Image: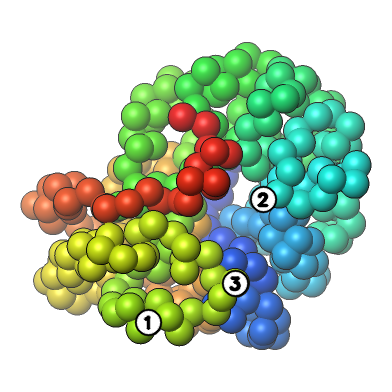
């Protein structure tokens, strides 16, 4: 697989999101053995960027990734995140990027990942109660100590990115970016000005762009813990209207003999060598399918068609989740 650069960090052109192996999606946590095989197969294919977070589980996903990388740590670029767990007793889904919380969080992640260092350590969401300068200052200390090698932010916006980068170079911004979530294109000029890469999570629209969910019955069959059951784009009239986007992606896939997932990933890759999608999966055959997208070249006409897709109906997160996304 070809490589890309996030700042000065070299990674595979396509990464692997590990969240769904343990958290958030139907079947999460039910087949750790297959999940480990999936990570091993990704490494075999040249996929190096493996993405996790302490909140996934919480904690169980980092433990899974740590087990999978036993004996193969040098082949991986490990990315994890802090800031959605308060370690002072307030618990999960509590924003806390204070220096004290970071110091506790990183030790837990290092232990669960069974590693001496984290390649890319992200603030998971911007903490309005902690100045970004204080957060980045604490992370810079961890870089000097050798516990982390690169600093990232997730779902931050323009002012925060500039202020953070002024304290210590930011390697990557991780945000949702796909054929149906395009707001990151507003931020790309700034990222390129500062030399910051973009890691695109949910590049397949939480699976919608693959065309595997077609009816209300398909949604009903999802586990109650599957966050798509409450996602505005997967419910009610929005779901029915958004099917046309999946249909248009399928049409391009049919033209080139590829899968819709591969088309969606190839479109993202066409947007720049500093953009790295991290499609998530817990199945070997899916990681093989996704990794093969790096060899697909879309024509200018096909890219124009995909650029012009009708915007998705509904927010890409619930209202409560959007409160944690800086815009």
**Figure check: 73 above or below 301:** below
Can see residue 290? yes
Q: What residue sits 15% from the left and 75% below the top?
A: 254
User: Left of 197 or right of it: where is 48?
Assistant: right
**Figure check: 309 above or below 214:** above
Image quarter for residue 96?
A: top right
User: Left of 120 or right of it: where is 312?
Assistant: left
Q: Residues within 10 Å of mark 1 (few under 14, many from 20)?
A: few
User: Left of 147 or right of it: where is 217?
Assistant: left
Choose the circle earlier in sequence order: 3 or 1: 1
**Figure check: 177 above or below 184:** below
Q: How many marks?
A: 3
- Measured as percent of width and height from the top left, residue 119 is found at 71, 46
Image quarter for residue 236?
A: bottom left
Which residue carries the number 3 mark? Answer: 225
Which residue carries the number 2 mark? Answer: 79
User: Left of 244 or right of it: where is 121?
Assistant: right
| Residue 218 - label | 1
Distance from the alpha carbon under mark 3 to that under mark 1: 15 Å
Distance from the alpha carbon under mark 2 to that under mark 1: 32 Å
Circle 3: element type: loop
Q: Look at discs 2 and 1 and give the one toward the viewer.
A: 1
- Measured as percent of width and height from the top left, residue 291 is found at 44, 68
Choose the circle earlier in sequence order: 2 or 1: 2
- Measured as percent of width and height from the top left, residue 113 is found at 81, 60
């Amino acid at each position: 697989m070809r490589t890309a650069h996030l700042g000065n960090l070299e990674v595979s052109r396509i990464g692997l999101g590990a969240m769904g192996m343990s958290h958030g999606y139907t079947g999460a946590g039910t087949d750790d053995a297959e999940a480990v095989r999936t990570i091993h197969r990704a490494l075999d294919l040249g996929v190096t960027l493996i993405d996790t977070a302490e909140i996934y589980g919480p904690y169980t996903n980092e433990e899974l990734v740590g087990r999978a990388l036993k004996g193969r740590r040098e082949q991986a670029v490990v990315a994890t995140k802090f800031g959605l767990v308060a370690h002072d007793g307030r618990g999960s889904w509590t924003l806390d990027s204070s220096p004290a919380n970071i110091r506790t969080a990183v030790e837990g992640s290092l232990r669960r990942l069974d590693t001496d260092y984290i390649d890319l350590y992200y603030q998971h969401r911007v903490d309005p109660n902690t100045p970004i300068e204080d957060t980045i200052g604490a992370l810079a200390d961890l870089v000097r100590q050798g516990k982390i090698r690169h600093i990232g932010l997730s779902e931050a916006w323009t002012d925060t990115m500039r202020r953070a980068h002024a304290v210590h170079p930011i390697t990557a911004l991780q945000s949702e970016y796909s054929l149906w979530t395009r707001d990151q294109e507003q931020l790309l000029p700034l990222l390129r000005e500062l030399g910051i890469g973009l890691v695109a999570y949910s590049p397949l629209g939480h699976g919608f762009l693959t065309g595997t969910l077609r009816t209300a019955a398909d949604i009903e069959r999802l586990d109650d813990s599957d966050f798509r059951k409450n996602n505005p784009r997967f419910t009610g009239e929005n779901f029915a209207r958004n099917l046309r986007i999946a249909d248009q992606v399928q049409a391009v896939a049919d033209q080139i003999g590829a899968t819709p997932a591969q088309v969606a990933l190839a479109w993202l890759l066409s947007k720049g060598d500093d953009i790295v999608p991290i499609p998530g999966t817990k199945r070997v055959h899916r990681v093989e399918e996704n990794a093969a997208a790096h060899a697909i070249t879309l024509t200018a006409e096909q890219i124009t068609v995909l650029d012009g897709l009708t915007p998705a109906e509904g927010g890409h997160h619930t209202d409560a989740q959007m409160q944690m996304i800086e815009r």
